[in-house]
Image (cartoon, helix red, strand yellow):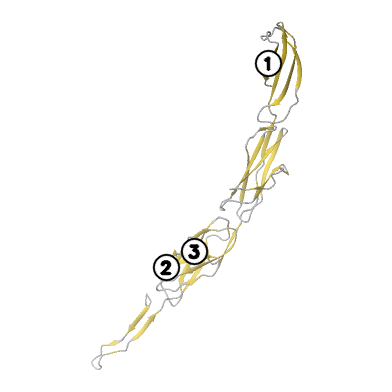
Amino acid sequence: MYAGVGNHAITVISSGDPNFIGSASSIVTQTVNPAATSTSLTSSVNPSVTGQAVTITATVSVNMPGSGTPTGTVSFEDDSITIAGCAADPVIGAGIATCADTFVAGADAITAVYGGDANFMGSTSPILTQTINQGATATAVISSVDPSVSGESVSYTSVVNAVVPASGTPTGSVAFLDGASTIPGCGAQVLVAGTASCNVTYAGVGTHGITTVYSGDANFISSTSPIFTQTTNQGATAAVGRLVGESVGGRPRRFLHRHRVRPSHPQAGHPPGQSRSWTAHRPSPCARLKHWSLEWRRAP
């Protein structure tokens, strides 16, 4: 048995015996060619999901009547395109080469091409169909301020993440719902880096059951967030007025006091104003002035 390829010049020499003279044969050239091989493929997980780590293993075997252990490299291809980082994976041990990769949803035709070495011929594996399903997602919604007050702007943010073993960043859009109704203007908020937002202002007090519904995309399955309860409370108010009057000879006269009630920041709205009359009970410190005024503010 020859371990390597090449040509071998073979002769047979007879040493003779007491009755016969020794002799040598003519040369016979023995040619040893590379042995044929077969390459096969297996997957660590099939089907997988989007972004899941998958290891493809190629096994190079020597076809009979050849024998031995192949060396060299294997190139892994996905639909005839070399997989990044797997162009020349070394054959080690018992003819094994591996390629680790992640795939997006679909059905990929994987092949392994063994390049051969000095003693063994190259070979290409049959196609391994790797099935990649959509990855699961988890959706959550948070509020910029909770509780809020009447008229205050509230920003909801929805975050969509891939669920292990899937990985990657979901795309598509999110719908924001208040109960069973879509929030106006927030029916299809586009995801950017896995997040989307919706701004809303509530005119009255109460609670709102907020959910977000992710629509899904080619690589990820749709999902709905748990309910987030947004509470809207009454807003605080402040009364602002101006006291305007006259004094004559140091004696106060009847004054007309007008004031209005306005909301305190951050809530908006316009509570109704009021008007009242007041009579001073002692001389004004501004008695020598014919016309005078006083600003005042009262919290509720």
Task: Name the residue: 66% across, 35% down.
Answer: 153
Q: Are marks 1 and 3 in contact (CB under 8 Å)?
A: no
Helix, strand or loop at mark 2:
loop
Q: Single out the residue that lies furthest toward the front.
A: 290
The mark nearer the N terminus, 1 or 3, is 3
Residue 91 x/y as whole percent: 43, 66
Of the numbered discs in the image, which one, if any, rests on residue 294? 1
Name the residue carrying label 2.
72
User: In front: 82, or 103?
Assistant: 82
- Say how many tags the image has: 3
Label 3 CA crowd tier, 10 Å (few <14, some 14–19, many 20+): some
Q: Quadrant of the N terminus?
A: bottom left
Crowd tier of the residue under label 2, counting other residues whose Cα lies within 10 Å: few below 14, some 14–19, many 20 or above: some
Give amino acid for label 1: Leu
Give the vertical position of 185 relative to 202 (above or below): below
Quick one: quadrant of the C terminus? top right
Q: Image quadrant of residue 50?
A: bottom right
Res 237 → quadrant: top right
Left of 274 or right of it: where is 48?
Answer: left
* Circle 3: element type: strand
Q: Amino acid at mark 2?
A: Gly
In the image, residue 228 sits, relative to residue 125, either above or below, namely: above
Q: Amino acid at mark 3?
A: Thr
Front: mark 3 or 2: 2
Q: 201 or 223, which is in the foreground?
A: 201
The residue shown at (69%, 39%) is 209
Placement of 213 over or under 244, stated as above or below = below
- Residue under label 3, please give it: 57
Farthest residue in the bottom direction?
19
